[in-house]
Amino acid sequence: MKREVESCMKALVDLNSDLGESFGAYTLGNDGEVMEFVTSANVACGFHAGDPSVMLKTVKLAVKKGVAVGVHPGHPDLVGFGRRKMNCTPEEVYAFTLYQIGSLRAIARANGRKLQHVKAHGALYNQAASDLALAEAIASAVKDAGENLILVGLANSAFCKAAEKVGVPLAEEAFADREYMPDGSLMPRSRPGAVIHDPEVAAKRVLRMVKEGVVTADGGFDIALKPDTICLHGDTPEAVENARKIREMLEASDVAIMPMEKVITSRG
Amino acid sequence: MKREVESCMKALVDLNSDLGESFGAYTLGNDGEVMEFVTSANVACGFHAGDPSVMLKTVKLAVKKGVAVGVHPGHPDLVGFGRRKMNCTPEEVYAFTLYQIGSLRAIARANGRKLQHVKAHGALYNQAASDLALAEAIASAVKDAGENLILVGLANSAFCKAAEKVGVPLAEEAFADREYMPDGSLMPRSRPGAVIHDPEVAAKRVLRMVKEGVVTADGGFDIALKPDTICLHGDTPEAVENARKIREMLEASDVAIMPMEKVITSRG
Amino acid sequence: MKREVESCMKALVDLNSDLGESFGAYTLGNDGEVMEFVTSANVACGFHAGDPSVMLKTVKLAVKKGVAVGVHPGHPDLVGFGRRKMNCTPEEVYAFTLYQIGSLRAIARANGRKLQHVKAHGALYNQAASDLALAEAIASAVKDAGENLILVGLANSAFCKAAEKVGVPLAEEAFADREYMPDGSLMPRSRPGAVIHDPEVAAKRVLRMVKEGVVTADGGFDIALKPDTICLHGDTPEAVENARKIREMLEASDVAIMPMEKVITSRG
Amino acid sequence: MKREVESCMKALVDLNSDLGESFGAYTLGNDGEVMEFVTSANVACGFHAGDPSVMLKTVKLAVKKGVAVGVHPGHPDLVGFGRRKMNCTPEEVYAFTLYQIGSLRAIARANGRKLQHVKAHGALYNQAASDLALAEAIASAVKDAGENLILVGLANSAFCKAAEKVGVPLAEEAFADREYMPDGSLMPRSRPGAVIHDPEVAAKRVLRMVKEGVVTADGGFDIALKPDTICLHGDTPEAVENARKIREMLEASDVAIMPMEKVITSRG
């Protein structure tokens, strides 16, 4: 019944991307271009990437482009870009997530903006997706930071349990360019076929997720997956081009693209 | 006329100290003891000292001890403890001050506390005291951070001009253990006699500042100095002892000691 | 036969400790005291602790006290003191170990000293002890650094295989205050009884290791363990006291204590 | 007399460039291209740029391209890229210069290479050029590091006095793209005309320096300037192109381009 009602409604989804990953004299990505097609920006906060001046510039750009601003907290690992698994305790993760949320919130507020969401970066995201204690630490920081921030987490992961347990709004995330396992987890990158390189294939998969709430997993069977937000990569010219194509195909298929806050609210 | 009225009122002043300067496995100072006699804590935010876990612990301790919490932003110079002059631009100082304010505010908020003030640390404080562009950068960050935070600045310095120009509440600070020049600036530490080691002498000087609004400067003449807050050092056992003595002598002389927010409000 | 010859010889062993772990304004441990009873110093090189000025001071102190100087490379994790497991690749570990060796060697050379050994710190040590690829990365850096440096590694661990494979001199290490498993590995700290707090018990265990080449493992059976060097902790006043006691008991039992270079050479 | 002899000899000079300035996930410059036309590489050592893995890669590339390897020590200011003046003490500068020399030397040695020179980076270079205590600190680190490393310093600056006083070989450096003051110092970048943008003009100036030992300074008069090495920038595609042109024009004018070690030796 609910399904039928939904199918009458226009399909909607948020597109998010990691932004503000430059640092000091180093430039990474092309934030201006990426902000043309995403609706939510995950802004690095100086731990794995970014610095206060880059954050300020990124927030100003997001305001100008009308993109919703979120926090992208990472491990304190600048040289490893936050991609290396680190055994930080849940207490440490709670404290540094709260810290990173606050740092960006002050900068956003100075530019007349409220924060929308919090999405962990790299190894922190991957570790927390399968470690409930870490996911709860992040969810608790989101909760205690106040202002009703949305926690972004991999669909079917520990993030979902943590959001429910802690009591924070959740946006379930899917990846356009990744193969899924039958249990709903991501196929490890080390396996052949884990990454989908053809933007057309990726776009069609996203379309099915958004419109039908399913995706074909490894083995050929469909599994349920109805994400609120899709992660698009924008750190290389090719990635930007693919992401743009995905957006265009979604729009051509009558999918409404809007910030995750509105997606969640519409779902009710 | 105003002076007469004031002299009828009880003398009042805030006592502040730099706290939360531990880092990772490194412990510095004895925050628990120092919080017994100060009314305002300047909490390091990870740039010159402190880390998210230390900040969280420090805020919890301040809540427990009833000490007002403020931000202690410093240069990004951990190995130099923020004591080395760095030529950061006003734009960089603005951005990293805003960042540091936000980082502590989220942690304070998670513990049910509002921030009271912002006091720059070490070289940043000294540079801004005589560099209006830097002082304005800090004042602007305080302003744009919102919530009516108080800017703490050296009395008779560029901080005062910046606070007025930018439009933020100001708490004028004096140092119990420092000699003053006839123009109201601090005698450079490199000169003999710049630091007052006898806590009794220091306490008497503070008493005159607070009660009479004057202090004897280098050369023997009195200059006007009516601070809202006095900086006490607590990074060595001796410093803690001296600070405690100063507080006791002030109380014995009927000076009311309270957070700078109340001192300023009382002044009107 | 060899055993009999050995038993005629005087028992000998090196005592090593982690030193130079202060950082900037932060002081950790009491290097001066610890250097009174150890024969080899593992000097931190700025990644998990230490900074160039601290390293210089530590090397000068070691020269004065006649303690052999070695490198104590750690993960790039200052706030975690190198104690948090990090998934650095073998290539990264190779590069940063070489870097840290070089940094200390230049400082030692400027003070007329050659380096003696390399002992990984904290999580890096623990990870490499059971991960041959990491142990080989460290051994290769030791090899490629030249000057015939000794690799220090946990007895019965991946370090031993790596040293043999890569072709570097090895000093096998044992811990005075740790319980051993029947397979020769350390009992995990999380298990009750893993840490031996009584210095007398610890000293007696070391004595048996050094004189008889055995230690009683968990379960009550003796296992073979004949270390070249014993790790003593000196980061707390209590630890210093215990370490001193162990040294005294060893000397009273006619064990010759000397830098690991001599221990290894004597063994032939 | 000496001048006549020199004029009979082929003019010779070294071309140096800052390389290995990438960091972690961040790429800066195009080292492969720049190494096609320079003879000496100044390799960043992790303080203002670079990391152990980048250093290793850069040294391997220099070995392959036949470029001499030198150390490029900078202030501990990664976010500021070492370009911000910092008040480090001569003792701190001595220690961190020694540290950085050692770190690169171990990596070079592992690749069969000796280091050739040490050239301070950015703000450290500029500060030391006019601060004899800092220049001496750097020169002393170069001396104490051993192996007869060459100190690179701005011609007519405190580096020259320091090299003489401390007793280290000196390579005097000139800048192809900078205007000089009548006293031989560089015109501050803030003044109009301080930077020469036309590669042809720059090349002609370098040619006169190298062949005639003079350059036209601000005001139109020639001043003596006979550099051993010329700094070429390679951090932008345009800079690379200009640098390549300068090399081509020098070669077309029969200037021999070779590492500074050989230039100095030839001079005697």
Image (tube, coloured by chain):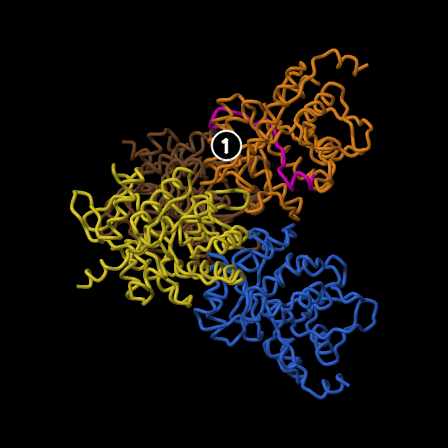
Chain colours: A brown, B orange, C yellow, D blue
On screen, residue A185 above or below D125? above
- Disc 1 marks a residue whose amino acid type is Ala
Task: State which region is magenta.
Answer: B110-128
Please indicate, yes or no, whether residue A22 appears anywhere in the rendered image: no
Viewer-nearest residue: A149 or A76: A76
Residue at position x 53%, y 74% in the image: D67
Letter of the chain that mark 1 sits on in the rendering: B
- Badge 1 crowding class, 10 Å Cα cut-off, few under 14, some 14 to 19, many 20 or more, is many
Q: Position of residue A195 (x, y in %)?
A: 33, 56
**Which residue matches tag 1?**
B106
Image position of B88 (left or right of A29): right
Extreme residue in the top direction: B8
Q: Position of residue C151 (x, y in %)?
A: 35, 60
Looking at the rendering, in which quadrant would you find the C terminus of chain A?
Answer: top left
Image position of C212 (left or right of A28): left
Residue at position x 16%, y 46% in the image: C221
* B117 in magenta: yes
- Which secondary structure, mark 1? helix
Viewer-nearest residue: D186 or B121: B121
Please indicate, yes or no, whether residue A264 appears anywhere in the rendered image: yes
* B12 in magenta: no
